[in-house]
Amino acid sequence: MSDSMERKNLLDPFGTTTIDDYTRLCKEFGIKPFKSILKEVPNPSTTMRREIIFGHRDFPRIIEAMKTGQEFAVLSGIKPTGQFHLGTVLTAKEIVYFQKQGATTFYCIADIEAYEDNRISFERSEKNAISNVADILALGLDAKRAIIYRQSKEVRVKDLAIIFSRAVTLATARAIYGDRDLGLYISALIQAGDILLPQLEDFGGPKPTIIPVGIDQDPHLRLSRDLSKRFRHKYGFIPPSATYHKLMKSLSGSSKMSKRQSNTSLLTLNEAPKEIRKKISNAFTGGRTTINEQRELGGIPEKCPIYEMDLFHFIDNDKSVKKIYNDCRSGSLLCGEHKAQAIERILGFVQQHRQKRRKFIEKAREILQVRTSVK
Amino acid sequence: MSDSMERKNLLDPFGTTTIDDYTRLCKEFGIKPFKSILKEVPNPSTTMRREIIFGHRDFPRIIEAMKTGQEFAVLSGIKPTGQFHLGTVLTAKEIVYFQKQGATTFYCIADIEAYEDNRISFERSEKNAISNVADILALGLDAKRAIIYRQSKEVRVKDLAIIFSRAVTLATARAIYGDRDLGLYISALIQAGDILLPQLEDFGGPKPTIIPVGIDQDPHLRLSRDLSKRFRHKYGFIPPSATYHKLMKSLSGSSKMSKRQSNTSLLTLNEAPKEIRKKISNAFTGGRTTINEQRELGGIPEKCPIYEMDLFHFIDNDKSVKKIYNDCRSGSLLCGEHKAQAIERILGFVQQHRQKRRKFIEKAREILQVRTSVK
């Protein structure tokens, strides 16, 4: 937990956040529960149905657009600090979902944030970005109908950040983000530029925009929504909508799965099978201290990163997930057995994903306009 | 005087600064007196000889380059908030001087600063910039050997600002500039980008660079010099050198001549003759309360904006200026007579300048790549 998280009311997009109480969070920041509007969504995604998405801001505006066929946009992105891991896959899936629902799609490689927040050079970000873009294409993003860009190369995003900065007092910046280097404030302004980019005239002007993110990114949303109002007179911005998904547990069962944590706490899409076996075998679970105890009391799937992987990613069928949940709770499914099943599912997914992504590496280079060294 | 100026030790580039004691200032901020190196300068400018330039940082590095024929650069600029006034003319003359001494010349239209600090829209800055560029060309800048650019259009400057921001803590920013909106901090980082732009590979790499400015701009120099050291490993930056000129008195005799002040306090190069007559006639002087008193005690040219105009701008011959100084001190030259002479000199200069600048308006448009409405 980073320093600033110790202050009350501060969600930290730049730190490693653990969220135990999503309901409290909704109340505190004025986020609406997603559950109450789920039935209005024409064709809800798995993450919506399974309550992985637990909250939203102004989502009815998106439902309206989906229903009436009005143009709307989706934007989210990745910090190119390393390989795609299961946390970033969640966002990727949500973007793919909204693209399929007809959204004009923006995928942002947040290399300025990676530089400011994680001290990753732009050169290194470029390499990671190729891999990341290949991953999201393999996950189903249709490149032909998407705007995929790097922050560092998108002049309009940088210009919006500069334009917005005049309206942000130091007091506001400190209230939202705490005391930070100027780089992190600039990074936040750049994110506001990303979030409002789809509404510029170059992209057809103001439109409802959905930003699917992890709850730790809400500070950027609050800033962007505030700025959308302050600059409405100039750009006609509509306040961006957001959905918030729960943060994935790390394999150690504690905080958010994050590239900040040691390698043993997260799983990437490009892991060697041997590594996957090892990491899952060593992972924390919701099991009891002895087998007897577990047979008697049952496990606690709510605490278990292995169950969460199934729920979030590796089992498509809702009934199959429910069965695992029940078998764990009843004590009939022990952790060893569950891990063995999970390993096979994950290996199957990763192998298939790898084959797909191989075909997209060149395409990713092309999209990012990175020249290959052999020519 | 802006709020933050009330804090000790804070020179304010964004405010209206009055400087009474240049010697104290030099000591406080580690600025070296220019007087002691004047004799080393191969071909000193009028502003150097007349001690209008009173201080410097690392100027011997520029003298060395001038003497050995090593490549060096000069950069300064203007905030396009209005017409060229006599304060900005001073900087312009210094740039023209260094260009004539062989410097690679950069002239920056600080439209991002005008936006952040003065709330001038980029559209309005563009109009002002055309006028400003025509002025500096009329003042002798050779466009063929100069890089004239707008901050808002120079991606490299914006990128440097983003790159630098990571190294600037909030504590540093507040110590140099006080508590400001994020826009003003960004503006400061953009200026650092300007100051170090001439040393990028695109312009031939690291080189001694002289930044001639008014003393109120020193905070930007301190920040830029600090950043040049922090990013030396990456870009090989040489800390930029600076000369500092005194700030021109406003016509009311008090603070710096600035576009922030009311129109009656400053003189622009594009003023109607009638206005010039009126402003000079109404100006504060170093005269006494009665004619008899002045005949007896003499005037105080050090306090007089009219004398300062002659010294800074309108009399080329050193001996002629000296004579006016002595005649004022002795009481033989009264303020009315001096004002009448000054009005003629200023009108002559302005008329000549106007004829020259008319020829440069189209050129200015072309340099700034602004399309004319009639085509």
Image (cartoon, coloured by chain):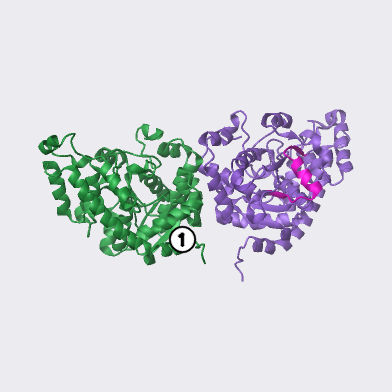
Chain colours: A green, B purple
- Residue under the image location 23 percent in, 55 percent down: A46
In the image, A95 versus A228, the foreground residue is A95
Residue B115 colored in magenta in the image: no
Instruction: Determine which quarter of the picture holds residue B304.
Output: top right
Asked if residue A159 is positioned above or below residue A180 in the image, the reply reads below
* Magenta region: B52-75
Instruction: Determine which quarter of the picture holds residue B300.
Output: top right
Q: Amino acid at mark 1?
A: Leu
Residue B64 in the image, given as x and y percentages of width and height: 78, 44
Residue A182 in the image, given as x and y percentages of width and height: 50, 41
User: As drawn, which residue projects farthest toward the front?
Assistant: A274
Secondary-structure class at tag 1: loop
User: As drawn, which residue projects farthest toward the bottom?
Assistant: B375
For label 1, the residue is A368
Residue B21 in the image, given as x and y percentages of width and height: 72, 30
The N terminus of chain B, quarter of image: top right
In the image, B119 versus A76, the foreground residue is A76
Instruction: Determine which quarter of the picture holds residue A266.
Output: top left
In the image, A307 versus A150, the foreground residue is A307
